[in-house]
Image (tube, rainbow, N blue to C red):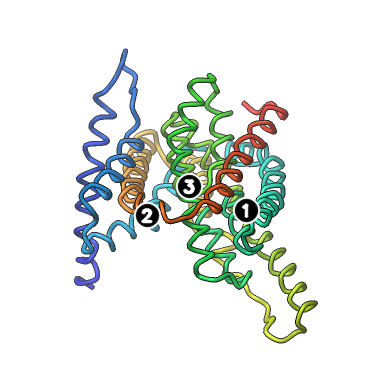
Amino acid sequence: MGVGVLKYVAGFALILAISLPARFFQSHLTVNGREVVSAVAIAILLGIAVRNLLGLPEVCRPGTGFAVKRVLRVGIGLMGAQLSLGQVVQTGASSVLIVATCIVLAILVVRFVSMRMGMSDRLGTLLGVGTSICGVSAIVATAPVLDAREEETSLAVATITVFGLAAVLLYPLLGRLWGLSDTFFGTWAGTAVNDTSQVVATGLIFSQRAGEVATVVKLTRNLFMAPVIVALSWFYLTRRQAEGGAAGTAKKTIKPHQAVPLFVLGFVGMAVLNSLGAFPPAARHAIQTVSQFLIICALAGVGLETHVGAMRRIGLRPFYAGLCAAAFMAVVSFGLISLFRIG
């Protein structure tokens, strides 16, 4: 067990070497007592700089991978303690129609655009699912259902990662420029940005409140993963049966953690406990501090795992398809939020 823990030490040490200065700069770079730079943004940019200028030692990879996959989810779960169950339900309910509309439109439009560019329908579908639901997690969960090749899965993951990271930097700038409210921006980020880590980063860079709203909306999106995978499984199974008979068309099953990720339940559970008064003010503040720092650490790991050189090998067609997908989600979700007057 000790050996198992030791393999994470080097990666955690590197993450702390990035996260602690990022947190320090956020708290000390202020104007009129207000923080003007986000520790999340600093951590991501420092992580990217370290990875691409100095490289990521092999010994650090287990720790950075664990931070991205596990620590982030713990941080998100703890964030629920800052909200009541009523706030979670209200925010999720107000965005559910927008989320559902964007998911359906994105899958159809991105798949159509990708196929028009000469890519396979499997790659187009993976790009659509990744853009509209849950980024990398949705791609990985959906790929077996489509019988997607490893190359198609890798291309979809790389493309989604590129545009998700671009959104982390671009969305807060646009939000400030256009004077968006915390609720409007959080709903926009939660609906349009791809991966959960990228959504949380985008929202928190704008403001703490926007980060909370973005997280709730994103978790609402995540719940659509199960029905979408079921629908795609039925569609591709039916098509394969029509094309070549029933041979080799065994039904793919969905694992429980794909249907409802555990960190979603953790987030809701913490909100329920907060609604019941389980956390006095001092405890709630302590939980918020821990949650914020864990998220900073996890997003430093995201930066450390971002290899710019590898992204250059995506190719022009997937890049253009990803650009169309990102632009489509940004415009459609912004329009729907404005139409429904959220925030």
Between 116 and 262, the one nearer to me in the picture: 116
Q: Hey, which residue is sitting farthest bottom in the picture? A: 247
| Residue 22 in picture, x, y percent from top left | 26, 36
| Residue 67 in picture, x, y percent from top left | 33, 55
Residue 146 in which image quadrant: bottom right
Q: Earlier in the sequence, mark 1 or mark 3?
A: 1
Q: Hey, which residue is sitting farthest right in the picture? A: 242
Q: Which residue is mark 3?
A: 270
Q: How many residues crowd mark 2 within 10 Å: few (<14), some (14–19), many (20+)?
A: many
Instruction: Calculate the distance from the C-alpha at mark 2 to the C-alpha at mark 3.
Output: 21 Å
- The label on residue 158 is none
Instruction: Calculate the distance from the C-alpha at mark 2 to the C-alpha at mark 1.
Output: 23 Å
Q: Which residue is mark 2?
A: 68
The residue that appears at 53% across and 38% down in the rendered structure is 214
Amino acid bearing label 2: Val
Q: How many residues crowd mark 3 within 10 Å: few (<14), some (14–19), many (20+)?
A: many
* Total count of labels: 3
The residue that appears at 21% across and 37% down in the rendered structure is 21
- Image quarter where the N terminus lies is bottom left
* 257 sits left or right of 37 in the view: right
* 72 sits left or right of 104 in the view: left
Q: Which residue is mark 1?
A: 128
Identify the element where label 2 is drawn: helix
Q: How many residues crowd mark 1 within 10 Å: few (<14), some (14–19), many (20+)?
A: many
Q: Are marks 2 and 3 in contact (CB under 8 Å)?
A: no
Amino acid bearing label 3: Met
